[in-house]
Image (tube, rainbow, N blue to C red):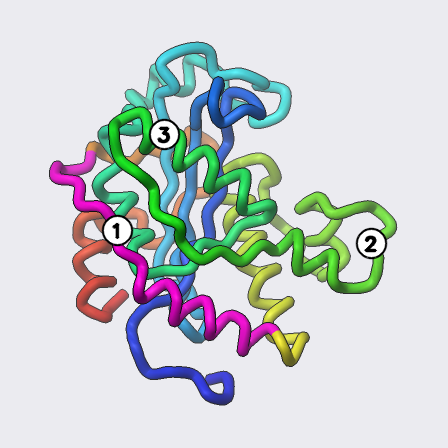
Amino acid sequence: MLPGRLQTRGGFAVVDVEATGSSSRRNRVVELAVVLMDRDFIPQGEFSTLVDPEGPVGPTHIHGIESHHVEAARAPLFSQIAPGLLGLLRGRVLVGHNVGCDRAFLAAEYGRIGVRFPEVPELCTMRMAAQREPLPRGLSLRACAEAAGVTGWSAHTALGDARATARLFTAYVQEHPQWPAHAEQELTRAAGVEWPKLAGTDALWVGRRGAERPLMRNVPVQKMVSSVRNGGA
């Protein structure tokens, strides 16, 4: 346990989205993943699903997702996973590599179903990497991960990128004395965020065939949400 850690609930939600394009206004989420971590940076659970974008899947050459993957998996619409996703994120600090981009897509998707995504505290591993010594290969997730010794992950899959980001985040926090205190401040802020309520039961979250499978994949999202709320994993 890091010095001064508060003994309260909460933690981090490491997110990654794959989308049909680069604009959160015009394009849609086609895959998303969430890696939950507690206040001590210990993984609590993972969730990943394809999402039906209700149209073309976009740059297959980047994310590897084709229309038949979405159709064969009977991927849910974003509206069908929205209640459970809110439950996973509630009370947590949002973490991502270029997290503002991930948040913009989530906010846009919730906006399409009439839900305002709150101003949740964020920690960005890309920004954290920029504060270290200059990286010769840039600030992409791959470059940052390789520089930090994070290997063995499936790039441009939502779960693979979320896992790599979680490992990168933990490494950065542990190697810089100022970042644990900053993370603690963000955890305190996250506890005070008012989240919208969204009724409904999630559709089944389904990953793409041949991709990495989430740990605790047999635990339904609703059960995991309930467990996290009650302080368990």
The numbered mark at residue 79 is none
The residue at the point 26 percent across, 55 percent down is: 194
Decide: is 42 above or below 145.
below
Read off the residue under disc 2.
135
Circle 1 — which element? loop
What residue is shown with label 3?
109
Residue located 58% across and 25% down the image: 22
Q: Amino acid at mark 2?
A: Leu
Mark closer to the chain start, 3 or 2: 3
Secondary structure category for the residue under label 2: loop
Which numbered disc, 1 or 2, marks the residue closer to the eye? 1
Range covered by the magenta-colored residues: 179-202
Spot occupied by residue 212 in the image (x, y as percentages of width and height): 47, 42
Task: Say whether residue 15 is left or right of residue 90.
Answer: right
Residue labelled with disc 1: 195
Q: Are marks 3 and 2 in contact (CB under 8 Å)?
A: no
